[in-house]
Amino acid sequence: MNLREKYNIPKHAVITVAGTVGVGKSTMTRALADSLGFRTSYEKVDTNPYLDRFYEDFEKWSFHLQIYFLAERFKEQKRMFEYGGGFIQDRSIYEDTGIFAKMHYEKGTMDPVDYNTYTELFEAMVMTPYFPHPDVLVYLEGSFDQIIGRIKERGRPMEQSTPIEYWEEMYERYNRWIDSFNACPVLRLDIKDYDLMTDPTAIEDVVERMGHFMKQADLLGK
């Protein structure tokens, strides 16, 4: 019996992994997919034509980057559900508007007209009863020091050149965002309790907790 059957995870579930940069979303995505026999859906970082430009000039490229992410994530969300589920998704579509676009608007690195256009488009596309929302959003959280340490360890050049104040701002915004998020059920996991980098077997504890959580969510009418 595999872990999906052992802990009663529906075979057609769509599970999204969310959290700030460096928290371990990709590692969790791979581990969950392997343990459940699910397919993966990753954020397209390497093929993103705006990402390097964005890190060089936030104000000039923030709107372009957000529109690109919105289109790509919307297409991917539709694809997963049209395929019939059974996916683990790395990063949610909701973070784009709730974290990144809002942050750039409030800090003056996205034009107010651009921000209004973006949020109206997001709401028309995503915040409707017709849009397929995930069954569970797995939210990874940890201390700021832990997360900065992970960003430094993986050594992506564009991240290394980004001021630490940017990561701190994002970290605080994620904390506020998840406290008010209600588009789907949220399972919060502290990375210090489930460190898959040092203990890959901890994924069974994650799946067990997810199974109990999904059962409880069903009982609550989610």
Image (cartoon, grey):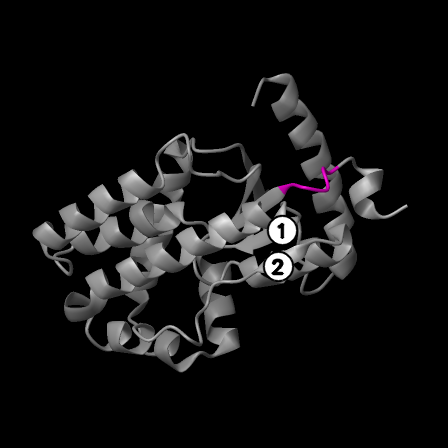
Furthest-top residue in this view: 220
**How far across and down, in percent of the image, does residue 132 sit?**
48, 39
Q: Which residue is mark 1?
A: 87
**How far across and down, in percent of the image, does residue 43 sit?**
47, 63
Quick one: quadrant of the N terminus?
Answer: top right
Q: Residues within 10 Å of mark 2 (few under 14, many from 20)?
A: many
Magenta span contains residue 109: no
Furthest-right residue in this view: 1
Q: Secondary structure at mark 1?
A: strand
Indicate the amino acid at tag 1.
Phe
Q: Is 45 on the left-hand or right-hand side of 103?
A: right
Q: Are marks 2 and 1 in contact (CB under 8 Å)?
A: yes
**Range of residues picked out in magenta:** 9-13
Is residue 141 at all visible to an observer of this figure? no
**Which secondary structure is most common in the magenta stretch?**
loop
Q: Is 154 on the left-hand or right-hand side of 119?
A: right
Q: Between residues 96 and 109, which one lies in front from this camera angle?
A: 96
Q: Between residues 159 and 80, which one lies in front from this camera angle?
A: 80
Quick one: quadrant of the C terminus?
Answer: top right
Q: Which residue is mark 2?
A: 40
